[in-house]
Image (cartoon, grey):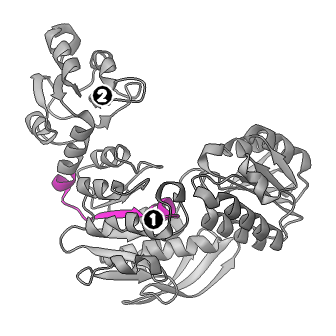
């Protein structure tokens, strides 16, 4: 519940009340009229093909607390007394800006520490781990609610008892992270890593580092940065007046030793406050780096290593990220189909190569937004797979031909059929590609046809 008085909601959102409603507080903020329910505050945003304000009357008739829409739609609703019913009607010249302004006000009202997480890879995994291991009532971004729309919705969904707010921040160009920090200035600014992601938009690694480093400029007074120890591209952006906590080899928070036992990763983690043994419910080496980042976040917030280690077994990851599906005949499917770039693709292949198997296979979708050197990045990934002995490889999409795969599929449906025909007992297969390729279809089809033990 957004426990602000209606008049304050209107003022903070930069809107005008055209019609008063009956309820005192809205339950939540929504932007999809199909999801708006009784007691919700609906923001009618301008979309690519339609203005959400066109659905405001329908939302109000469904029992919404109220609507915040562009002035023309609000005036029409206020003039039609039956349309407004018992709901509040708020008029705004910029409904998206109003959503963001109200989220900023609610974040101030919560008064809890805010963590902002950006980076080329690992943002969601770091967020998932941090949500699990940081003590107290933690509210975090669901799925990929990390944009100028998703981030304010996440904040407005935070309950009043929230003690730590963990927000993922996406970047698709210069200025976007700064915009998100205007909505929620982080007390802990986190950069997971810098890699060749969005090169099509920004051109160089240095430009990517500059865009990610906007989160450092958006730090709240007295804030602290968490960055990888080996990110040289960030060095020009680390000001002397920003306290910095580093993670990874050579950093302030690092793994002194680690080993995989029974599918779980055990590590002794060292931080400025001491050392502690952790047992993580995953086996991937790259997720150890993500865990170290999350532990560094906890250290920055004052959490003890002992508290975080006790909570580590409860770590779960968001959908389509590193899921291990157990299929019939002992086949394992590693479903990492949410997204891909050269760094994460290499890490996933490295993990695949460590697993015991009859054969190790991969369904590799093309990697998007890599700029003019995209073909070269794909060739490097294909060569890496061959060095690791991963065979056969099914490529999916036009650029995937650069992997030099054994088989090339036009789309995810064709890849699913090809994989189903070639799988043998005790195989392990990795499914990974950029989100636009839609490789979750492969996991879904294989799961339907070869159902066995489920997920582990």
Using the rendered view, name the quadrant where residue 307 is placed.
bottom left
Q: Against 448, is 455 above or below?
A: below
Q: Residues within 10 Å of mark 1 (few under 14, many from 20)?
A: many
- Residue at image location 38% in from the left, 69% down from the top: 190
Q: Position of residue 199 (x, y in %)?
A: 53, 59
- Please say whether residue 1 is visible from this viewpoint: no
Labelled disc at residue 108:
none
Give the residue pinned by disc 2.
44
Residue furthest to the front in view is: 372
From the viewer's side, name the closer residue of 383 and 15: 383
- Residue at image location 77% in from the left, 64% down from the top: 382
Q: Position of residue 276 (x, y in %)?
A: 47, 86
**Part of the protein shown in magenta:** 107-127
Q: Against 202, is 313 above or below?
A: below
Q: Is residue 354 magenta?
A: no
Q: Residues within 10 Å of mark 2 (few under 14, many from 20)?
A: many
The N terminus lies in quadrant: top left
- Residue at image location 65% in from the left, 51% down from the top: 337
Q: Position of residue 389 (x, y in %)?
A: 85, 70
Q: CA distance from mark 2 to mark 1?
A: 33 Å
Q: Are marks 2 and 1 in contact (CB under 8 Å)?
A: no
From the viewer's side, name the closer residue of 358 and 434: 434
Give the residue pinned by disc 1.
208
Using the rendered view, name the quadrant where residue 373 is placed.
bottom right
Label 1 residue SS: helix
Q: Against 113, is 107 above or below?
A: above
Closer to the N terminus: mark 2 or mark 1?
2
The C terminus lies in quadrant: bottom right
Label 2 residue SS: loop
Q: Position of residue 88 (x, y in %)?
A: 17, 24
Using the rendered view, name the quadrant where residue 282 is placed.
bottom right
From the viewer's side, name the closer residue of 11 and 65: 11
């Amino acid at each position: 519940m957004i426990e602000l008085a209606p008049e304050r909601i209107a003022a903070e959102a930069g809107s005008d009340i055209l019609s008063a409603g009956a309820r005192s507080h809205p339950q939540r903020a929504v932007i999809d009229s199909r999801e708006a329910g009784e007691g919700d505050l609906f923001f009618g945003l301008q979309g690519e093909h339609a203005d959400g304000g066109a659905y405001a009357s329908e939302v109000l008739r469904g029992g919404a607390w109220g609507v915040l829409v562009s002035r023309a739609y609000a005036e029409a609703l206020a003039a039609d007394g039956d349309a407004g019913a018992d709901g509040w009607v708020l008029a705004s010249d910029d409904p998206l800006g109003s959503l963001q302004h109200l989220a900023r006000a609610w974040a101030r009202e919560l008064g809890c520490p805010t963590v902002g997480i950006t980076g080329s890879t690992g943002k969601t995994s770091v967020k998932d781990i941090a949500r699990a291991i940081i003590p107290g009532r933690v509210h975090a971004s669901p799925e990929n609610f990390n944009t100028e729309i998703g981030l304010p919705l996440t904040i407005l969904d935070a309950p009043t008892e929230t003690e730590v707010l963990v927000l993922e921040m996406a970047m698709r160009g210069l200025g976007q992270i700064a915009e998100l920090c205007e909505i929620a200035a982080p007390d802990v600014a986190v950069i997971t890593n810098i890699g060749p992601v969005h090169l099509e938009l920004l051109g160089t690694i240095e430009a990517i580092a500059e865009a990610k480093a906007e989160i450092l400029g958006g730090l709240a007074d007295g804030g602290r940065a968490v960055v990888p120890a080996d990110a040289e591209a960030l060095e020009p952006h680390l000001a002397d007046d920003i306290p910095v906590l580093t993670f990874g080899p050579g950093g302030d928070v690092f793994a002194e030793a680690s080993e995989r036992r029974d599918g779980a990763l055990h590590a002794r983690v060292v931080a400025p406050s001491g050392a502690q043994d952790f047992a993580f419910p995953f086996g991937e080496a790259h997720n150890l780096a993500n865990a170290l980042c999350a532990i560094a976040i906890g250290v920055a917030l004052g959490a003890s290593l002992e508290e975080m280690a006790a909570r580590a077994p409860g770590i779960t990851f968001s959908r389509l990220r590193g899921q291990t599906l157990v299929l019939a005949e002992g086949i394992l499917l590693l479903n990492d189909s949410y997204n891909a770039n050269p760094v994460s693709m290499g890490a996933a292949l490295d993990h695949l190569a460590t697993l015991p198997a009859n054969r190790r296979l991969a369904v590799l979708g093309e990697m998007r937004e890599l700029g003019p050197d995209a073909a070269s990045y794909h060739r490097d990934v294909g060569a890496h797979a061959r060095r690791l002995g991963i065979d056969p490889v099914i490529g999916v999409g036009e650029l995937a031909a650069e992997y030099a795969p054994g088989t090339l599929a036009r789309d995810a449906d064709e890849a699913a059929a090809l994989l189903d025909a070639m799988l043998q007992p005790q195989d392990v297969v990795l499914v990974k590609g950029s989100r636009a390729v839609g490789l979750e279809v492969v996991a879904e089809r294989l799961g339907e046809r070869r159902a066995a033990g489920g997920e582990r």
